[in-house]
């Protein structure tokens, strides 16, 4: 039988364990897998683009487990009362191809994205960073703020969104977090004033310029999350040219990330090299560092691996017959006889 984790099961677990606890666990799983980068068969995701959105499949595997995520990105989905991003995923046994886990990944993707962001910042941001600007206060914003507060010690989040109701939602959701000061800013530039870290996580599928050179100061770490497909950017190209750029999987980020604005040979560093060597990505306190994050399948592999381990340990979710459970694996025709006949045949055996 296949383990199945639906939204309700995961939501109940998180409400008991805490979002921050799951983020911390996710960071540990991510680091474990990024350290063994060369063990994985990797590829850029398969994307189907339309004028109003994108639907993607994201596969990755090592010698033991295969994972994929189905995910979309439709900025206008609010008009249909649907999330901008929706996802589910599968973890399978390579030896047999058997799917051991089917799980929701909409909520999980927000958690793994925040965990990836803060993991990267531990290697790229200044150790004394305490103030973060958060531009884009939609569905992923709370997770980003909690990750940076819990794992990196961020004490103040300066938030801005073109939709003030999104910022109001963000502040209401996090108003009770101890030790975290929330500042509602009137512009992206105001949010960036005195910020040590800037996180951009906007949804519009267009070549946008959310962050301009006048908003950037020496020593800043930029966590660019929202630019994640061809024709969708957030960061002015001049900022990219003056900072040290780190990416997940270079062949994918060249197509989808903010660096799609730069020459194909502009130097970037894949993040796994920092993690494997346990070294800082910055050479000085004044250096500008940029994490051009587009989301990579290995992170979903780590997330599914964590969910499977939690399900095994804590009984999250249920079991479903996603693929046939046959007394005789050669007799698929048995399934055409209906449930009662199958039960009778098993008893007879």
Image (cartoon, rainbow, N blue to C red):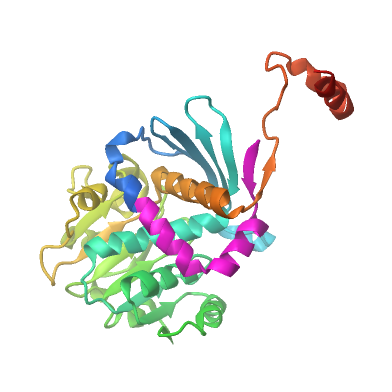
Question: Residue 66's x, y, as percent?
Answer: 47, 34
Task: Give the prevailing secondary structure in the magenta stretch.
Answer: helix
Q: Which of 17 and 277 is in front in this view?
A: 17
Rendered location of residue 237, percent (x, y): 25, 59
Q: Can residue 51 be seen in this view?
A: no
Magenta region, residue range: 1-30
Q: Which residue is drawn at 29% across and 41% down?
A: 36
- Determine the residue positioned at 17% across, 48% down: 267
Answer with left or right where residue 22 lies relative to residue 194.
right
Residue 214 position within the rendered picture, expressed as x and y whole percent measured from the top left? 24, 75
Residue 290, position in %: x, y?
A: 25, 61
Above or below, comparing residue 71 to residue 75 in the picture: above
Point 18% across, 72% down: residue:
219
Q: In which quarter of the image is the C terminus?
A: top right
Query: Is residue 95 at least partly visible in the picture?
Result: yes
Name the residue furthest left. 284
Which image quarter holds the N terminus? top right
- Kindly give the residue lying farthest to the top in the view shown: 330
Residue 347 shown in magenta:
no
Q: In this view, does 205 lie above or below 44?
A: below
Q: Which of 292 and 303 is in front in this view?
A: 303
In the rendered view, does 82 fall on the left or right side of 22?
Answer: right
The image quarter containing residue 40 is: top left
Find out whether residue 28 is within the magenta segment.
Answer: yes
Q: Which residue is drawn at 23% across and 71% down?
A: 220
Q: In which quarter of the image is residue 319?
A: top right
Residue closest to the eye, 273 or 248: 273
């Amino acid at each position: 039988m296949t383990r199945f984790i639906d939204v309700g099961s995961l939501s109940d677990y998180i409400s008991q364990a805490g979002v921050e606890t799951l983020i911390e666990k996710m960071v540990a799983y991510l680091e474990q897998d990024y350290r063994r980068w060369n063990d994985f068969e990797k590829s850029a995701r398969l994307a189907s683009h339309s004028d109003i959105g994108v639907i993607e499949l994201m596969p990755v595997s090592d010698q033991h487990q295969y994972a994929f995520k189905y995910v979309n990105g439709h900025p206008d989905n609010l008009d249909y009362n649907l999330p901008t991003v929706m996802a589910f995923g599968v973890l399978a046994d390579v030896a047999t191809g058997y799917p051991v886990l089917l799980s929701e990944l909409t909520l999980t993707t927000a958690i793994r994205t925040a965990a990836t962001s803060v993991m990267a910042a531990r290697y790229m941001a200044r150790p004394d960073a305490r103030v973060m600007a958060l531009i884009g206060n939609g569905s992923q914003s709370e997770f980003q703020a909690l990750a940076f507060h819990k794992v990196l010690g961020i004490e103040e989040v300066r938030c801005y969104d073109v939709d003030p109701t999104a910022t109001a939602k963000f502040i209401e959701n996090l108003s009770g977090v101890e030790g975290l000061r929330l500042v509602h800013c009137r512009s992206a530039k105001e949010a960036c004033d005195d910020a040590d870290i800037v996180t951009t996580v906007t949804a519009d599928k267009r070549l946008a310029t959310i962050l301009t050179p006048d908003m950037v100061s020496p020593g800043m770490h930029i966590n660019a999350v929202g630019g994640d497909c061809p024709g969708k950017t957030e960061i002015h190209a001049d900022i990219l040219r003056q900072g040290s750029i780190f990416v997940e999987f270079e062949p994918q980020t060249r197509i989808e990330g903010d660096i799609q604005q730069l020459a194909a040979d502009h130097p970037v560093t894949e993040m796994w090299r920092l993690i494997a060597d346990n070294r800082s990505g910055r050479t000085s306190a004044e250096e500008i560092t940029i994490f051009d994050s587009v989301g990579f399948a290995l992170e979903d592999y780590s997330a599914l691996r964590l969910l499977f381990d939690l399900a095994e340990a804590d009984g999250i979710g249920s079991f479903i017959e996603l693929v046939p459970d046959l007394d005789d694996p050669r007799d698929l025709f048995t399934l055409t006889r209906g449930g009662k006949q199958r039960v009778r045949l098993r008893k007879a055996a």
